[in-house]
Image (spheres, rainbow, N blue to C red):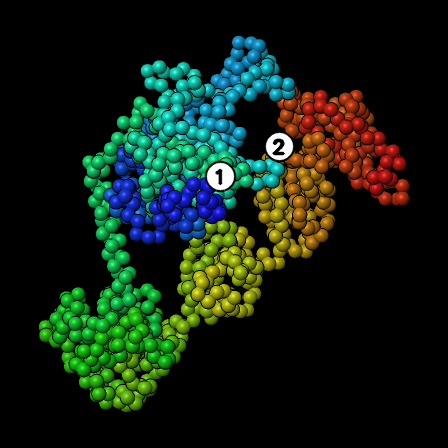
């Protein structure tokens, strides 16, 4: 209201120098603040993951269909995977909606759909989601006490019919439905939409109905409802395709719906005792356009007219007008403003079934095992949440013992990627003293019988235990001892289980050194862990020999060879055993490794006679996956090989695994940019396995492909691979053949190779083969036997076909000719099927040739009568009359003006019915040929 109107004394708003204003304030329930939905309404909402408001609206609707909720609780989900079970996720959401005081999350439900995070930010079709959920629940309920609940609640029946106007004939079919899609464009209210749904369509003119023995009849086509279900889902078709803009659009037309409706007039035989009177239970509303928007649902939970608005996580009370009248759509009083907020789905409950459908759901309706499982999940999640919130206060400590060293065949003491640690989560500020007490308790030893040795990454790329001063470092925290670089790797030394000692021997950090011992067996090509020793730094190397012999089970006077494991690919032999350790070993430190083996002359005959040879070989070892090239999804098998192996050494190992001859294998590199076989390897390849794998990713699997051969690889490389199809005497493609004729061979050599693989029938056949070149289902030519194979190229649509020459085609007389035949339909370029050849004779009646072709094709008389035959020259057909007698010149290429030779004519078999209209026969005049050229 303009201020000057308010101040105008003639208007009467001012009285005693005052203005009295009556103001109405209406506030929506707020988002993002401490709004307590449970306190204000008794219900809770669902969290929005980004664009899941449409799903939240649907879930609330299903939840408040109480009879359905009861059945959902009864679904058997005891053995379901909680991350993949849609049924269990629904049970969880319904339980939490019923019991929680805060909004409920839906991430586990969308995860069970198989959705990624991005899917939660995309709006999906509500009707489709509803049907998917109902189908899933229905299948889960089969064979249980609640089987059939969903059909009983949601399934109605309609009759689709076609009724003839002028005769007494009607065809009908009864169909079930779970929801009804109603057109609202231009419809005033729901009743008009229903009327439009059952409106009949007239079938007349070219669209007459085929009434069987009555022939084509004018008819009416339509549907009528046989029965409506207790819960009626109505989808208002707000989103439709617009052919003018070639896009989906949202229809915002006004369409009224009422709190109570009577649908008896749409039922074929209404029941007077149980009229189809429905009460509005839910209104699902969309705000926005077809590109997106927001969804809310208005619900009448108890069917008593008390409405609530469910807007994701916020639930609030609302009026009946807000729930119903404000969501009709259409124009506002100002015609330029069009409502984009309107109902798109309605849920009605049959009045006679209201008490049953909306019955209370109590604790007794929920199975005890489901309550226990959900409580356990909740407890576990709270524990996980607590751990995540306190994760920064803890650090992992990975503990290994000598048990993990046994069996290790590589460098250092264990393989970090494959070893099984004992992992402890400890407070970062925990002191060393309490940490050792915790370790002792967990490992089952007194504190005096354990000693920790933290692992340290040395500058030479080794990972060895190092000394820790337990007495002086007791008050230091584990994070300080780990040098602020968790996780902390610790070797835990413990007393031997069989010993009677009460504590570990003392260790003097200034004068003692801890060494690890390994024994190498050249015959077995294995390394065995031989324990560790404390010895003074001044100990001579030879003083270790008795200890080593005892640990290895050798005689005490056995001569040994010793090596120091310095770093990967560097193992040095210890030459002088009289030297003290600090001079014999390179930079003596705690955690150094000495490898010993018997000094036995027989070792020289072994493949890897010394530990130095073994570790050099180990350095070059690589695990390679070999996959069969002919099997696309073959997982393959793994082999550990040396990168220094040549082609034949690799082939020998693979052949041994496959139990075949190495020469009957062909190998292929892996393409660097994708996981697929690349170029074949020649058996004369001079590089090593390392060269073959050099183009592969550093951390990815090392993969090579192979295929088995029927001939040795060295022979194959001097031959040419030739693929062709063998067609038998019945014109059936028998099989694909892969032949290996000589590279410099001819067609005759190829046919000879094919003959070795084929078992031709002995009776009636000629035993002679020929090679046909086929392009687009037409025979292009018959290749002569002296043609070189290098002149043949099977690219594009060209294929090569081998077949046995029929006995009658072995010799062709002067008055005879072999004609190429092909099948086509309507257009001569639309060829299909298997082409073939037929022998014709000058002056022969074409009816006899038709008989030959029918016999060759094995086609019944009735079907063969439909075929038409034509002579095809340069893409033009001339249909052959029935009285035609063969003129060989009609099937021979002619010289056209200018001296060019036209293509050889062929005989076409047209499969279109001969009664159909045809193009006019084309006469091959000289002028026409010139124009065509």
Q: Which residue is drawn at 78% across and 34% down?
A: 876
User: Closer to the camera: disc 1 or disc 2?
Assistant: 1
Secondary element under disc 1, as helix, strand or loop, is loop
Q: Which of marks 1 and 2 is nearer the N terminus?
A: 1
* Quadrant of the snapshot with the C terminus: top right
Q: Name the residue under label 1.
A: 339
Q: Mark 2 points at which residue?
A: 730
Residue 676, visible in the rendered structure: yes
Q: Say which of 278 and 408 sits in front.
A: 278
Give the image quarter of residue 857: top right
Q: Is residue 689 left or right of residue 540?
A: right
Q: Please state the horizontal and vertical placement of residue 534, each as a whole percent of the image.
A: 21, 81
Q: Which residue is drawn at 42% across and 47% down?
A: 51
Q: Please state the horizontal and vertical placement of residue 23, each as a whole percent of the image.
A: 37, 43
Secondary element under disc 2, as helix, strand or loop, is loop
Distance (Cα) linking label 1 and label 2? 71 Å
Query: Relative to 876, does residue 798 appear above or below in the rendering?
Result: below
Q: Is residue 448 left or right of residue 39?
A: left
Q: Please state the horizontal and vertical placement of residue 99, each as a whole percent of the image.
A: 24, 43
Q: Please state the horizontal and vertical placement of residue 898, each as a whole percent of the image.
A: 89, 44
Query: Relative to 744, does residue 150 appear above or below in the rendering?
Result: above
Query: Relative to 343, does residue 918 appear above or below in the rendering?
Result: above
Residue 89, visible in the rendered structure: no
Q: Which class describes the residues within 10 Å of circle 2: few (<14), some (14-19), or many (20+)?
A: few
Query: Relative to 681, does residue 151 appear above or below in the rendering?
Result: above
Q: Say which of 484 and 887 sits in front.
A: 484
Q: Which class describes the residues within 10 Å of circle 1: few (<14), some (14-19), or many (20+)?
A: some
Q: In the rendered structure, are the residues bearing label 1 and label 2 in contact, judged by CB atoms less than 8 Å apart?
A: no
- The circle drawn on residue 277 is none
Q: Residue at x 57, y 59 (%)?
A: 679
Q: Which residue is drawn at 38% across and 31% down?
A: 347
């Amino acid at each position: 209201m303009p201020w000057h109107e308010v101040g105008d004394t003639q208007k009467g708003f001012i009285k005693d120098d005052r203005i009295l204003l009556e103001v109405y304030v209406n506030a929506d329930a707020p988002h993002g603040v401490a709004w307590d939905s449970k306190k204000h309404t008794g219900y809770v909402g669902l969290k929005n993951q980004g664009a899941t408001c449409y799903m939240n609206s649907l879930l609330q609707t299903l939840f408040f269909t109480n009879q359905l909720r009861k059945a959902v609780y009864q679904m058997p989900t005891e053995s379901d995977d909680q991350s993949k079970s849609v049924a269990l996720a629904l049970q969880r959401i319904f339980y939490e909606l019923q019991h929680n005081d805060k909004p409920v999350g839906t991430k586990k439900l969308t995860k069970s759909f198989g959705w990624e995070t991005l899917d939660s930010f995309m709006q999906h079709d509500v009707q489709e989601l509803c049907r998917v959920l109902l189908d899933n629940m229905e299948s889960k309920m089969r064979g249980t006490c609640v089987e059939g609940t969903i059909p009983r609640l949601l399934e109605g029946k309609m009759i689709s019919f076609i009724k003839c106007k002028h005769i007494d004939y009607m065809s009908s079919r009864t169909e079930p439905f779970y929801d009804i899609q109603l057109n609202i464009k231009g419809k005033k209210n729901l009743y008009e939409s229903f009327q439009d749904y059952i409106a009949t369509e007239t079938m007349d003119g070219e669209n007459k109905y085929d009434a069987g023995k009555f022939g084509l009849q004018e008819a009416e086509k339509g549907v009528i409802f046989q029965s409506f279900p207790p819960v009626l889902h109505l989808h208002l078709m707000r989103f439709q395709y617009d052919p003018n803009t070639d896009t989906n659009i949202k229809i915002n037309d006004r369409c009224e719906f009422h709190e109570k409706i009577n649908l008896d007039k749409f039922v074929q035989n209404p029941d007077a005792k149980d009229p189809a009177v429905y009460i509005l239970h839910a209104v699902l509303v969309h705000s926005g356009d077809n590109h997106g928007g927001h969804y809310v649902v208005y619900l009448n939970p108890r069917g008593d007219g008390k409405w609530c608005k469910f807007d994701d996580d916020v639930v609030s009370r609302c009026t009946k007008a807000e729930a119903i009248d404000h969501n009709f759509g259409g124009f506002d009083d100002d015609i330029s403003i069009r409502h984009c907020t309107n109902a798109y789905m309605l849920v009605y409950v049959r009045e006679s079934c209201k008490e049953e459908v909306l019955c209370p759901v109590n604790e007794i309706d929920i199975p005890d095992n489901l309550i226990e499982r959900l409580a356990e999940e909740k407890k576990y999640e709270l524990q996980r949440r607590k751990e995540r919130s306190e994760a920064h206060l803890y650090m992992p400590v990975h503990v290994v013992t000598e048990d993990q060293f046994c069996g290790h065949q590589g460098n250092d003491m264990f393989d970090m990627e494959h070893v099984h640690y004992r992992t402890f989560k400890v407070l970062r500020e925990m002191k060393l003293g309490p940490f050792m007490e915790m370790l002792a308790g967990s490992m089952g030893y007194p504190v005096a019988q354990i000693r920790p040795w933290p692992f340290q990454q040395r500058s030479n790329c080794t990972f060895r235990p190092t000394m820790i001063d337990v007495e002086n470092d007791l008050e230091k925290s584990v994070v300080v001892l780990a040098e602020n670089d968790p996780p902390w790797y610790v070797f835990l030394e413990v007393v031997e289980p069989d010993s009677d000692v009460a504590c570990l021997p003392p260790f003097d950090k200034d004068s003692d050194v801890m060494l690890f011992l390994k024994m190498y067996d050249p015959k077995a090509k294995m390394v065995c862990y031989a324990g560790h020793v404390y010895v003074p730094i001044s100990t001579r190397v030879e003083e270790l020999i008795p200890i080593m012999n005892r640990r290895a089970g050798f005689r005490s006077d056995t001569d040994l060879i010793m090596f120091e494991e310095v770093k990967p690919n560097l193992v040095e032999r210890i030459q002088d055993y009289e030297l003290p350790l600090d001079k014999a070993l390179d930079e003596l430190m705690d955690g150094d490794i000495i490898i010993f083996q018997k000094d036995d002359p027989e070792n020289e005959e072994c493949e890897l006679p010394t530990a130095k040879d073994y570790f050099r070989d180990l350095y070059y070892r690589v695990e390679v996956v070999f996959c069969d090239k002919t099997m696309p999804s073959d997982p393959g098998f793994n082999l550990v090989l040396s990168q220094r192996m040549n082609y034949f050494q690799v082939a020998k190992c693979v052949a041994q695994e496959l139990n075949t001859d190495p020469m009957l294998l062909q190998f292929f590199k892996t393409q660097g940019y994708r996981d697929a076989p690349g170029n074949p390897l020649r058996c004369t390849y001079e590089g090593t396995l390392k060269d073959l794998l050099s183009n592969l990713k550093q951390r990815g699997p090392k993969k090579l492909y192979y295929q088995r051969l029927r001939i040795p690889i060295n022979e194959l490389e001097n031959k040419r691979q030739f693929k062709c199809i063998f067609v038998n005497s019945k014109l059936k493609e028998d099989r694909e053949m892969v032949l290996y004729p000589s590279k410099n061979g001819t067609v005759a050599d190829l046919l000879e190779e094919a003959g070795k693989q084929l078992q031709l029938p002995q009776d009636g056949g000629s035993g002679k083969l020929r090679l046909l070149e086929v392009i687009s289902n037409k025979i292009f030519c018959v290749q002569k036997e002296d043609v070189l194979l290098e002149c043949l190229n099977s690219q594009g649509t060209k294929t090569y076909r081998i077949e046995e020459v029929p006995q009658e085609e072995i010799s062709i007389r002067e008055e005879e000719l072999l004609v190429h035949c092909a099948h086509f339909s309507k257009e001569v370029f639309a060829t299909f099927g298997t082409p073939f050849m037929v022998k014709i004779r000058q002056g022969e009646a074409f009816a006899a040739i038709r008989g030959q072709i029918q016999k060759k094709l094995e086609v019944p008389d009735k079907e063969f009568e439909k075929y038409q035959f034509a002579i095809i020259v340069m893409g033009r057909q001339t249909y052959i009359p029935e009285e035609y007698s063969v003129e060989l010149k009609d099937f021979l290429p002619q010289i056209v003006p200018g001296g060019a030779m036209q293509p050889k004519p062929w005989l076409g078999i047209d499969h279109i019915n001969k009664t159909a209209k045809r193009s006019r026969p084309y006469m091959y005049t000289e002028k026409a040929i010139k124009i065509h050229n």
